[in-house]
Structures are given as C-alpha cells and as structure tokens.
Image: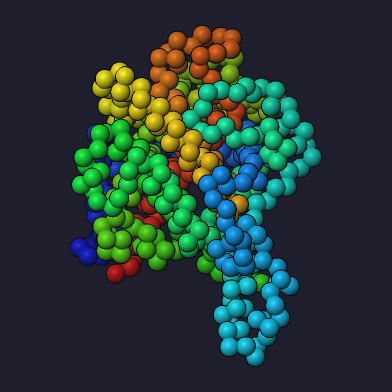
C-alpha cells in the first residue's frame, strides 16, 4: 500500500477491505476484474454490435441558456475561429497579447480534442439501417433520447475514446453541481447527513459520485501529455490523478470517491448477473447481419455473463427497497425521475465528446437499475418468442456493456496509478 504519508498511501489508504453498504472487499474486485473480466470485455466491446452507438448530440440544454463568448470554457460548443478575434488582441504590441494568444490556442486545442469523429463507412451505414429492424422501444430509466430525430447519428466509439479534452472550469463544475444538487435528494459536503440517509438515497448519491470518479480516472489516465507537430502523446497524468483523489488535496474526499467507484462497479456487475436469462434465450441475437461473427459474439457475451454470475461477493440488492411496499414504490419512482433528469442534464455538457460519453454512461447505469428493478419480470420471461414484459433495446444493451466497460477500465487503471504512485513521494 506504500509507506505512511506516501502519495500511494494518501490516495488508496482507505480504499481497501470492505465497502460501506456491501459485503464485498476491494481486493476481490481488483483480482476478478483485472484478470478474469477486463480482457474479454474489451474484446466484446470492439465488435461491430457494441462499437456503434446512436446519439443525438444536438439537443439543446433544457435547463439554462449559456451566452457563448470566445473563451476556453465555451469553445467545444462554439468553435473559436482565429479570425473572430480582433487583430488588436493578437497584435504583439498589446499588453495582454500573450495571454490572449494562449487563450486562442487553448481554445482551439479544446475544440479539436472535444470534437466527435462522425465518419462511418458507407458499408457500416447500410448495416446499421438493418440493425434497427431488430429493435423495439421499451420502458426506460433514462430520458428516451430522441434517436429517431434526424439529428441522431451513429458514432463509432472506438474512434472517439473517452479522454482528456480540455473541457474544465466553471462549465464542467456547473454540470456536476446541478447533478448533485438537483438529483441527490439533498446534497452537501457533510457526511453526517449522508450517514443519516436511508440506504436507498445513500446508494443513489454513491452511484453518481462513483460515475463522477470513474470519468475522472479516465481523464487522468488518457491525458494529453504532449501535443506538437512531431507527435501527440497520451498517457497517465499522476498530478491530475492526485488533485482529484489524494486525501490531503481533496480534504479527505478523494478516497471516498474511489470507494464509490467500486460501489458503482458492484451495482452494474449485479445487474449483468441478473440479466443473463434475457441473453440466454435462443431467440436473442447480437444482430449485425454477419451470422458467424454474431454467433461468436453471443458466445463471448454469455461466457462473460456466466463469469460475472460466478463472482462470489455480489451486492445484495434486496437491501434496497426492502421496506414498506408503498414507500418502496415511491422511492423507485424517485430514482427513475432523478435518473431521467440526469440524462437531460447531459445535453448541457459543452464538449461534444464528453457529452457523448456522459449520455452513454448515464443510459448504461439507468439500464442497470432497470434490470435490478425487474427481477420478477425477468424470471417470468418466456423461453422463446418476444418478451413483452421485460425487454432491452439495442441502444440499452450497447450502453449497458460500454458503461460497464468504462468502470471496468477505471478499476484496471487504479492498479496502474497505484504502481505509478509508489515511485512518487
């Protein structure tokens, strides 16, 4: 774990042993994820069925109107063209010229890094049209993204990896503040308040915090280390990681965030173990039109789900909503409404690449919750023919596995950061 007071110790000292509200320990998750699950999951997510995600990135923010002006925080929404900036500002004779030029440069860089590559081959475009025939709509925890809209497009997730984009500052903070304040029933930094909450509301807060932590791990692990005409180099930024998770730098908050990431992992892992019967039905296929590949991918998918089912220390979701039936129903509804709200807030994210991954991970977590709340419906599914009571659309399936893939990657990256931090004092 590192010597007392070391960098590794400060980030990870509390991230060990049992997790609050769970009977599982961090070390068991690390071993299971990093060696058994992660490699196979990555292979599955690189297949055609899982790499193309339909999303509308042009939906307006329903909560506020930002006045776009040329500045780093807005650049991913409204590109800042050099010719829009008055020559006077760029002129070397001005007092603020260096600062202004840096701003333009940073602005252009963030715009470039945050842009989504929407290119799909003609062949792929034809194929995805076929896939939609195999899809139905279903009751969902997320705001049904208007994927029927002419603005909705398929995006290749492998061409648009989640990584640092330069999107930070007031805009990014505003998004998270709204998510916490509006959707976590009540939020402040006093953990005594959190301890006093019923387990369900605490779980909701921890899921959001875990998602936030996971995204921050990705941004620290795929950070722009060098950007010159010679090369663009991405890699682990230890300083960035410490700023977000070091106990001293975050006033004790960082290790709690990491614990919440593991909590999120367990919730999504449990949902995947519960949904196995849906995918096991002979009628279900990961349809892309390539029969051999589709068959192989289904086998790999079932292999992964069986491995997940064998995990020895699953989260017991019966601890949620176990009380009074009427109250439980109301809480469930609260969860659903808060979640739909969060998926709408994602339309306010200024950087398109961040918006893409934010929407996907929110939908994936919403789908996991939908599964956990549908246990009886899954148990009563017919073995063949359409399943009307419980159904997952292709959209939900792709987001569910990709969202879990992101958390699985975070857990794997934590191991890398642990090792890197051992060499830092």
Q: Is residue 52 visible?
A: no
Residue 336, horizontal then vertical, whole percent: 44, 30
Front position in the image: 199 or 64: 64
Question: Image point 37% across, 63% down: which residue?
Answer: 243
The scheme the figure's colours follow is rainbow
Quarter of the image that includes the N terminus: bottom left
Left or right, 48 with respect to 166, comes to right
Q: Give the x, y percent position of residue 295.
A: 61, 24
131 versus 231 height, above or below: above
Is residue 265 in view? yes
**How far across and how far down the image is residue 340, in percent?**
49, 35
* Residue 77 vertical placement versus 395 (above, below): below
Quadrant of the image containing the C terminus: bottom left
| For residue 190, side relative to residue 285 (left or right) | left
Q: Is residue 227 left or right of residue 309?
A: right
Residue at figure coordinates x 71%, y 71% from the top left: 84
Residue 305 place in picture, x, y as percent = 45, 27
Q: Please, which residue is most extreme toward the right here?
A: 122
Residue 43: image quadrant is top right
Q: How many marks?
A: 0
Please tell me whether residue 47 is drawn above or below residue 175 in the rendered image: above
Task: Locate residue 26: give its quadrant.
Answer: top left
In-image side of 394 versus 18 (left or right) = right
Q: Residue at x 21, y 40 (%)?
A: 196
Depth check, front residue: 15 or 56: 56
Task: Name the residue furthest bottom.
Answer: 93
To which quarter of the image does residue 286 belong? top right
Q: Nearer the viewer, residue 377 or 161?
A: 377
């Amino acid at each position: 774990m590192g010597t007392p007071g070391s960098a590794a110790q400060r980030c990870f000292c509390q991230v060990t042993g049992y997790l609050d509200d769970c009977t599982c320990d961090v070390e068991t998750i690390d071993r299971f994820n990093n060696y058994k699950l992660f490699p196979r999951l990555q292979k599955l997510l690189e297949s055609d069925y899982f790499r193309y995600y339909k999303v509308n990135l042009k939906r307006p923010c329903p909560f506020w109107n930002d006045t776009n002006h040329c500045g780093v925080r807005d650049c991913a929404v409204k590109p800042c063209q050099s010719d829009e900036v008055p020559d006077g500002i760029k002129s070397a004779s001005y007092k603020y010229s260096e600062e202004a030029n840096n701003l333009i440069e940073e602005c252009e860089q963030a715009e470039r890094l945050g842009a989504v590559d929407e290119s799909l081959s003609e062949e792929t475009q034809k194929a995805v049209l076929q896939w939609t025939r195999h899809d139905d709509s279903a009751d969902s925890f997320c705001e049904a993204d208007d994927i029927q809209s002419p603005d909705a497009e398929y995006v290749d997730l492998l061409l648009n990896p989640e990584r640092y984009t330069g999107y930070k500052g007031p805009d990014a903070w505003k998004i998270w503040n709204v998510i916490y304040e509006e959707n976590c029933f009540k939020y402040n930094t006093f953990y005594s308040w959190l301890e006093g909450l019923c387990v369900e509301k605490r779980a909701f807060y921890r899921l959001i915090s875990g998602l936030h932590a996971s995204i921050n791990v990705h941004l620290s692990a795929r950070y722009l280390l060098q950007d010159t005409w010679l090369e663009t180099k991405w890699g682990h930024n230890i300083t960035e990681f410490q700023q977000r998770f070091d106990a001293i730098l975050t006033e004790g908050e960082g290790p709690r965030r990491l614990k919440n990431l593991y909590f999120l992992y367990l919730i999504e892992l449990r949902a995947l173990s519960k949904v196995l019967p849906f995918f096991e039905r002979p009628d279900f296929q990961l349809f892309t039109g390539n029969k051999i590949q589709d068959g192989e991918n289904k086998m790999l998918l079932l292999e992964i789900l069986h491995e997940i089912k064998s995990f020895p220390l699953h989260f017991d979701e019966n601890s949620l909503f176990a009380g009074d039936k009427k109250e439980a129903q109301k809480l469930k509804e609260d969860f659903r409404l808060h979640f739909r709200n969060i998926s709408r807030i994602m339309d306010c994210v200024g950087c398109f690449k961040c918006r893409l991954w934010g929407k996907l991970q929110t939908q994936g977590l919403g789908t996991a919750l939908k599964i956990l709340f549908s246990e009886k419906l899954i148990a009563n599914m017919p073995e063949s023919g359409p399943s009307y009571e419980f159904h997952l659309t292709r959209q939900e399936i792709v987001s569910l596995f990709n969202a879990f893939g992101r958390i699985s990657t975070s857990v794997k990256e934590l191991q890398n950061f642990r090792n890197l931090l051992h060499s830092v004092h």
